[in-house]
């Protein structure tokens, strides 16, 4: 398998985590010591890959890139980042970065040239829908296409061969200078498909296991993961179900979403996440905090590539605001959670699940089989050969007894979470009898079981 098909990701938004100024006024500082501390924390959680949000020079939040070849001075230098990637590789972490190729900031050099030279600029073809008979919110005396209605984010013309070559040269620079292992493509749902196809072909000349994952919110995910396109996209469909399915005690929503996405993408492994830098923290979306461990079980158990967003392994909270996302991207310190017993317990579960993901091939390669689906109880297996790992969840406020047909012949069942839950009133019980797997699940609990094949 390629490394990314068995990876567990940890996502960091560097400008937020490091407490950088929200506007870039040329400050020079170094956040890589803090990023290193959190990378080592991610590895301790048994994550095997790190996804870093935007870290190249920009005017504000990182998605208004002004220089693709320069690490944001609010974070450090190119040499700092190169050393950071080397350290990540040494401790067993792959590194992917945000590739913001759909749009640029207004101080991107080719756009500055358009602002200065207007129709005479050699870069007019780099940008979409330039109209020198209109105006924009900055009073430049011309209009242009943007992303999301924000004139701060100037849309590039990815169909222009010069723009494509510029991006390819940038990716080569990142791979050669920093040693990155892949790219998360920002706003992939509005990137030109021809550009994406060409990017995939180009990246395969750099290294055969260079991962391309796209941010796609709505639509037929299979269009982006078709042969010759991206390896993966963000599974936003499941993201919504993870919180609403628990709040409404409706595991049908989650299970049906899994089926729907697999119908679109087949065996493509999508990025599975409970929250990220653009959506509310899962701990703020769930009505019952006891459902947080259940969501964690689903992130690691369902088909896909699991990804934790920094701080959410501790149950960090944040609601999305209408005018800013900075509260979703906070400055945090690992010590903030040191004395919070609930936070440490959730992180311990993430660590246990990460270890299982890293050591049990069935969680990456195993067939997904739905075993039980009720409004408030859900069980499924990951089956590889004659081994099976079973996830069973109960989101009801009352205990539940369930019986399942084992997906493989088994003589013994092992609790893979044994010792994580110390409250004896919340310990699931499992046993094999009469050819059935019988489970007693306390209220709002779940379990992970391994079936031992009989001789």
Image (tube, helix red, strand yellow):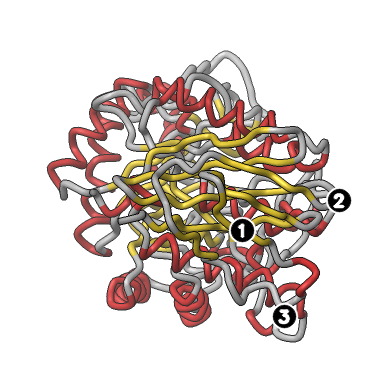
Q: Where is residue 176 in the image (x, y as percent from the top left)?
A: 19, 59
Residue drawn 23% across the image and 49% down it: 1
Q: In this view, does 176 lie above or below 208?
A: below
Q: Alpha-carbon distance for marks 2 and 3? A: 33 Å
Direction from residue 260 to residue 454 in the image, left or right: left
- The foreground one among 438 and 247 is 438
Residue drawn 54% across the image and 23% down it: 260
Pick the quarter of the image with the C terminus: bottom left
Q: Mark 2 points at which residue?
A: 398
Q: Where is residue 274 in the image (x, y as percent from the top left)?
A: 63, 49
- Residues under numbered marks 1 and 2 in contact, where contact means CB atoms less than 8 Å apart: no
Label 3: few (<14), some or many (≥20) within 10 Å? few
Kindly give the residue lying farthest to the left in the view shown.
205
Q: Name the residue under label 3.
A: 336
In what element is the residue under mark 3?
Answer: helix
- Mark nearer the viewer, 2 or 3: 2
Q: Which of marks 1 and 2 is nearer the N terminus?
A: 2
Residue drawn 46% across the image and 58% down it: 450
- Mark nearer the viewer, 1 or 2: 1
Direction from residue 387 to residue 246 in the image, left or right: right
Q: Name the residue under label 1.
A: 430
Q: Alpha-carbon distance for marks 3 and 1? A: 37 Å
Report whether residue 32 is seen. no
Q: In this view, does 100 lie above or below 257?
A: below
Report whether residue 40 is seen. yes
Residue drawn 57% across the image and 21% down it: 143
Q: Position of residue 368 (x, y in %)?
A: 44, 38
- Mark nearer the viewer, 3 or 1: 1
């Amino acid at each position: 398998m390629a490394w990314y098909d068995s990876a567990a990701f940890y996502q960091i938004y560097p400008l937020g985590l490091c407490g950088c100024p929200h506007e870039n006024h040329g400050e020079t500082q170094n956040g890589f010591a803090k990023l290193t501390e959190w990378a080592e924390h991610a590895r301790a959680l048994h994550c095997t890959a790190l996804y870093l949000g935007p870290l190249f020079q920009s005017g504000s939040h990182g998605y208004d890139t002004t220089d693709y070849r320069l690490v944001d001075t609010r974070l450090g230098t190119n040499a700092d980042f190169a050393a950071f990637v080397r350290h990540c590789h040494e401790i067993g972490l792959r590194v992917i970065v945000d590739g913001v190729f759909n749009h640029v900031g207004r101080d991107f050099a080719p756009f500055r040239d358009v602002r200065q030279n207007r129709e005479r600029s050699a870069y007019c073809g780099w940008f979409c829908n330039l109209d020198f008979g209109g105006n924009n919110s900055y009073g430049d005396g011309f209009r242009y296409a943007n992303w999301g209605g924000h004139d701060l984010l100037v849309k590039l013309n990815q169909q222009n061969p010069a723009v494509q070559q510029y991006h390819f040269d940038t990716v080569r620079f990142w791979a050669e200078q920093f040693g990155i292992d892949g790219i998360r493509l920002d706003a992939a749902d509005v990137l030109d498909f021809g550009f994406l196809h060409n990017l995939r072909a180009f990246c395969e000349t750099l290294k055969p296991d260079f991962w391309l994952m796209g941010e796609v919110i709505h639509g037929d995910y299979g269009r982006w993961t078709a042969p010759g396109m991206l390896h993966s996209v963000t599974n936003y469909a499941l993201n919504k179900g993870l919180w609403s399915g628990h709040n409404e005690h409706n595991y049908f929503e989650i299970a049906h979403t899994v089926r729907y996405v697999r119908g679109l993408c087949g065996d493509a492994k999508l990025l599975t996440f409970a929250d990220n830098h653009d959506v509310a923290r899962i701990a703020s979306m769930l009505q019952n905090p006891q459902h947080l461990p259940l969501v964690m079980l689903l992130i690691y158990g369902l088909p896909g590539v699991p990804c934790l967003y920094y701080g959410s392994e501790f149950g960090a909270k944040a609601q999305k605001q209408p005018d800013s996302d900075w509260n979703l991207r906070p400055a945090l310190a690992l010590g903030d959670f040191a004395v919070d017993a609930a936070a440490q317990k959730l992180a311990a579960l993430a660590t246990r699940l990460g270890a299982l993901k890293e050591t049990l091939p069935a969680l990456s390669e195993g067939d997904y089989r739905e075993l039980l689906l009720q409004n408030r109880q859900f069980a499924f297996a990951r089956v590889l050969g004659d081994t099976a790992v079973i996830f069973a969840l109960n989101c009801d406020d009352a205990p539940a007894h369930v019986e399942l047909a084992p997906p493989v012949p088994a003589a013994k069942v092992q609790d893979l979470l044994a010792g994580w839950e110390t409250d004896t009133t919340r310990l699931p019980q499992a046993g094999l009898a009469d050819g059935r797997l019988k489970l007693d699940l306390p209220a709002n609990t779940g379990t992970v079981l391994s079936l031992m094949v009989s001789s």
